[in-house]
Amino acid sequence: MPRQVGSWTQDKLKILQQYLPAYLAATTKALERIYIDAFAGPGLNRLRGRNLTIDGSPLIALDARARNGTKFDRLLFIERDRAVAAELRGVLKTSDKTQRATVIDGDVNKELPRLITKLHQRSPTFVFVDPEGIEPRWTTIEAIAPWRTELLINFPLGMSINRNPDSDKVTAYFGTDRWRALWNSTRPGRTRALLQLYKERLAELGYRYTTQDDRLVKTSQGRRLYYLVFVSKVAIARRIMTSVLTQPNSTGQIRMPLSRGLPINHR
Ligand SMILES: C[S@@+](CC[C@H](N)C(=O)[O-])C[C@H]1O[C@@H](n2cnc3c(N)ncnc32)[C@H](O)[C@@H]1O
């Protein structure tokens, strides 16, 4: 069964869909290009309240193609829920005629660090990290950092922290307990401060290029859900993603880059 999603999911997927062809064009000269979906889902999404089924991130990546025809050579889809993984395999039977994709059943924190060691360290590898909460541990992100990886991350807002008051999970997510002081502060902008901490930690891993305007995804009622965070080790990637982020979002709104500066390299 396709995943039931709100219309705002289109916003996230549109960014992925617009960025990947440019990524493929920029990496054409490499021997191979790899896509990893760390939280793959079933492959298809059903828009709630509308009789419309849209491609999920695995199918978007499978279809992605640069103007010169370059595609991903290999696509690796990790999914913890066995029924969902089986559904994705079923969808791929018709969509993946060239058999470039592999579905891996299991938890991302176990499978991704294991999987990455089997890839060539110089192969451009795009990793989409799209959890529903704060599942990816920092050690998982650290494990893939030495590879030629570029990341698009769904960074959830405070609710996921509220849901995990035990705090060990939050510390595992940030890889430090520095989040606590930020969380306990009542000043406005707490979420931005947490996001800033996360991005600073990513920069320490070598992901120095990020966009200034992280896309904030909201429900149609205006409830804030998550930020989409993009990080890369190459400057050109930042320029391309910045141009994608200034395209209209799924509601047709044009996004202007924020003028606020971050202490990470944005140039
Ligand atoms: C937000 S959905 C992914 C949607 C997909 N990226 C798309 O756009 O079509 C998150 C998926 O991750 C799976 N998941 C949750 N925790 C996981 C974990 N620890 N490891 C791997 N998959 C997990 C869930 O079963 C769910 O299918």
Image (spheres, rainbow, N blue to C red):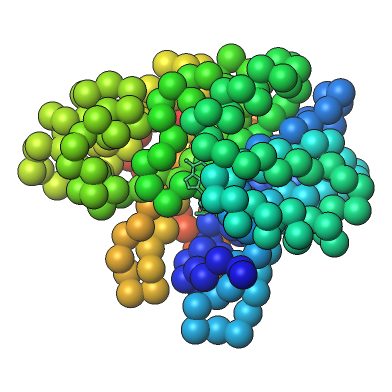
Q: Position of residue 193 (x, y in %)?
A: 24, 36
Q: Residue at x 59, y 50 (%)?
A: 82
For the residue pair 248 and 56, the one nearer the viewer reads as 56
For the residue pair 265 and 110, the one nearer the viewer reads as 110
Q: Position of residue 125 (x, y in %)?
A: 69, 29
Q: Quadrant of residue 13?
A: bottom right
Q: Left or right: where does residue 201 sit relative to residue 255? A: left
For the residue pair 1 and 121, the one nearer the viewer reads as 1
**How many numbered markers are drawn?**
0
Q: Quadrant of residue 194?
A: top left
Q: Residue at x 40, y 44 (%)?
A: 155
Q: Residue at x 65, y 25 (%)?
A: 115
In the picture shown, does residue 120 fall above or below 190?
Answer: above
Q: Residue at x 57, y 39 (%)?
A: 106
For the residue pair 215 and 104, the one nearer the viewer reads as 104
**Residue 142 in view in this figure:** yes
In the picture shown, does residue 30 fall above or below 88?
Answer: above
Q: Quadrant of residue 177?
A: top left
Q: Position of residue 250 (x, y in %)?
A: 54, 68
Q: Left or right: where does residue 175 sit relative to residue 94? A: left
Q: Quadrant of the N terminus?
A: bottom right
**Residue 214 in view in this figure:** no
Q: Residue furthest front?
A: 82
Q: Position of residue 55 (x, y in %)?
A: 68, 64
